[in-house]
Amino acid sequence: MKKIPHRLYLTEEQMPKQWYNLRADMRELPDPMLNPATFQPVSEEELYPIFCKQLAHQEMDCTTRYIDIPEEIQDFYKMYRPSPLIRAFNLEKALGTPAKIYYKFEGNNTSGSHKLNSAIAQAYYAKEQGLTSLTTETGAGQWGTALAEACSYYNLPLTVYMVKCSYEQKPFRKAIIETFDGHIVASPSNTTNTGRAILEKDPNTTGSLGCAISEAVEKAVTTEGCRYVLGSVLNQVLLHQSIIGLESKTAMEMLDEYPDIVIGCAGGGSNLGGLIAPFMQDKLTGKASPRIIAVEPASCPSLTRGRYAYDFCDTGRVTPLARMYTLGCGFIPSANHAGGLRYHGMSPILSKLYHDGYMEAVSVEQTKVFEAATLFAKQETILPAPESSHAIRAAIDEALKCKETGEAKTILFGLTGTGYFDMNAYSSFLNGTMTDTIPTDEELEKAFGELPKIPGIQ
Amino acid sequence: MKKIPHRLYLTEEQMPKQWYNLRADMRELPDPMLNPATFQPVSEEELYPIFCKQLAHQEMDCTTRYIDIPEEIQDFYKMYRPSPLIRAFNLEKALGTPAKIYYKFEGNNTSGSHKLNSAIAQAYYAKEQGLTSLTTETGAGQWGTALAEACSYYNLPLTVYMVKCSYEQKPFRKAIIETFDGHIVASPSNTTNTGRAILEKDPNTTGSLGCAISEAVEKAVTTEGCRYVLGSVLNQVLLHQSIIGLESKTAMEMLDEYPDIVIGCAGGGSNLGGLIAPFMQDKLTGKASPRIIAVEPASCPSLTRGRYAYDFCDTGRVTPLARMYTLGCGFIPSANHAGGLRYHGMSPILSKLYHDGYMEAVSVEQTKVFEAATLFAKQETILPAPESSHAIRAAIDEALKCKETGEAKTILFGLTGTGYFDMNAYSSFLNGTMTDTIPTDEELEKAFGELPKIPGIQ
């Protein structure tokens, strides 16, 4: 029998040299993005004012199965990748489960999360095109940190619109983004028309990812040589993040393992889409049939309680329309501590796969998430981010089911990042002041009522 | 020519199974610790009320060259070790130096530093002896976090005395230590006689490691089943930390490399002593002659401006006396951001080696340290702790000297940890409010005047 190491690192030679494009294997593709003015499918060229050309191309490319990772990006990856695949021996023991729990840990870089995988790619293509600045939004601050790192590496000025509740909960995020020369603005702000309109309507809003996106897009399209980049939701981001799943699958093969269940937290879908990519490929091509579970916060349950409909990707209604599971672009979730999961929609690719039955989804309450997070921290000596801890919660729940049934299932989950900037959240859990706020049916119906009307479609 | 990977991980099989005891190869041993009441060398048994027995034995053992790492500790190590040896390709390029810069990165665990290497060993031996609680002190909070993790793993209640200025600079350290069930007290405190005496004398003191040690020791010796553990200075700690150097040496051998210069930051000496151990062995046994450089803050320059004398290890004058480089146990350094380097003394082993000419020392000002830290962060995508950044500063300075002379020296430095809990320090550097406070000769003379008088010795 093979000796199972606690943590397995691939060698640099074993690292993927291509990203995997899940769309190439989907039987039915996600519905096309629509131009919000004409309601016609957008063309690649129509995206050029927002995204740099290579990224617009990747966004629209549904057929190229494998896309070469430019060598410069491969070299950057080698500064912090491969990330380890870890066997949770101690967690298994603490749970008394016969299940084998593996996790892919993406937190071993300064951004503290998987976000750097796409950030460096997007900064690289922007630099290659000769752009002179970038804008983006950030929720928990992980994406903003990652992109600031990547932009600093390429000397590209960056403005980050940070969701106001995260900005206030995480003062040190500002300092780290500034350490990497990023300019950070609390959103909604007075720097854009969208921001001003939202503030006028509700001066005390805690903000949302959707709103921060509006501001960043507006800033990009109104600034010469500037483009917008996004850390989740988009097809291009899932493409870049496929490196997580590709590495995981190779590592599991080396251990003669294959997951019965693959679990990831889901906000916009970047980590989940990346982690599951090659396993979903097996499922789509009939080679294997792992269960795939998306885990979302009960406070922002886009898959489990949302509508599958065309919606704006932002609150300000300036972006193209995407068909996805959505709570309505006007929905502002409660100030949950998992800032990275407070998005009203879900990746169109993942939405389609979920709609077609290839994927399950569960929602979990944040107090239950932090119970799992603290147990995990003590057993595995890694302090997980609140977002990642959603996946931990579901993995523990599945492992406990195995304990009941006696099944020795193999569980793989994505540990997307670390919680060093989330100590306020841990404090509120420890001192018992953390609450769970779940939207009522009425609140959701109200938000659904504001979904865009599209003649002949919805 | 061998291809040099960006980061090299040993396999679990290659990990050291024994710690290396530097004293076994020293030509002259450090002078013995003295009982502060009798001024006679302390015996192992006299240490039992303070340290658990196995650790007291390790503290006194000057002859056993290699000491087996218990299997349970080896298993714990495998949760976060081996740590990577990283080639700083990007930093080299940014500096334009012909030097080859390697660093051993110890920050990839939740404590964020190398401290866990000794914490888990000390908690293990305490548990093995049937002790029911532990106390300790912490400066920057890295040791407190590491020990809380280790104690939580073994269900050992822990009280942490945290230097007041760090406690105030780093509010989130409290939360993370509490996440691991540690009880944390700002030092000086009203919970001990020593703390009360110091507060009475100076109610506004920012505290010091020496003072926190006094409180933790007092609490330990006055509590049934409780012992004191320390994260630095002691011989036992250097022993446990030798795993850093042993792994580094094996990794460098795999790359056909040997360092011309080995650099570590130095507070109490835990990281430096561990990193240099096998290289110092080569030097002591005549096999090689690398330069070995200790880097300390200009605000707390125990090696570069201290006296080699018998002194108390704590401010409250309750511990045994050790002969070491010291600024005087009454010396309270300015509130430098590198809380982990604010200790008045230095490991007796390292002090002796420095005194005998086997090691160099430099002191650096904190603004220069943060210049190095931000440059490093941008090039290497790791946000370094202020303590670790002292080593980065010296490594950069040596690499720049190579640029002048054209020499392609091989530099190895220890990157002991991450700076996620030090964003206040980064902020003050970024906004230009960071200052450098260096003790005057008069201040040092005053502190030296309070060194203990020992009949026939000093």
Image (cartoon, coloured by chain):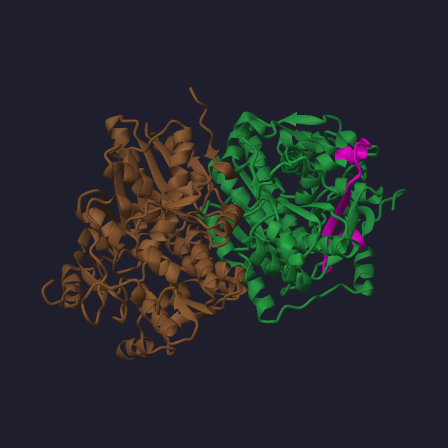
Chain colours: A green, B brown
Residue B341 position, x and y percent, is: 32, 56
At 59% from the left and 60% from the top, the residue drawn is: A374
**Residue B316 in view (yes/no):** yes
**Residue A190 in view (yes/no):** no
At 44% from the left and 27% from the top, the residue drawn is: B4
Foreground of the two, B208 or B213? B213
Residue placed furthest toward the left: B456
Residue B303 position, x and y percent, is: 21, 52
Q: Quadrant of residue A205?
A: bottom right
Foreground of the two, B214 or A179? B214
Q: Which residues are magenta?
A: A281-304
Q: Quadrant of residue B402?
A: top left
Foreground of the two, A216 or A440? A440
Residue A290 is covered by the magenta coloring = yes
At 68% from the left and 56% from the top, the residue drawn is: A96
Query: Residue B275 vs residue A377: left or right?
Result: left
Query: Residue A390 vs residue B52: left or right?
Result: right
Residue B42 position, x and y percent, is: 25, 64
Residue B214 is covered by the magenta coloring = no
Task: Identify the image quadrant of the N terminus of chain A.
Answer: top right
Residue B248 position, x and y percent, is: 39, 38
Where is B69 relative to B281, above or below?
Answer: below
Where is A277 relative to B422, above or below?
Answer: above
At 63% from the left and 65% from the top, the residue drawn is: A204
Query: Residue B280 vs residue B153: left or right?
Result: left
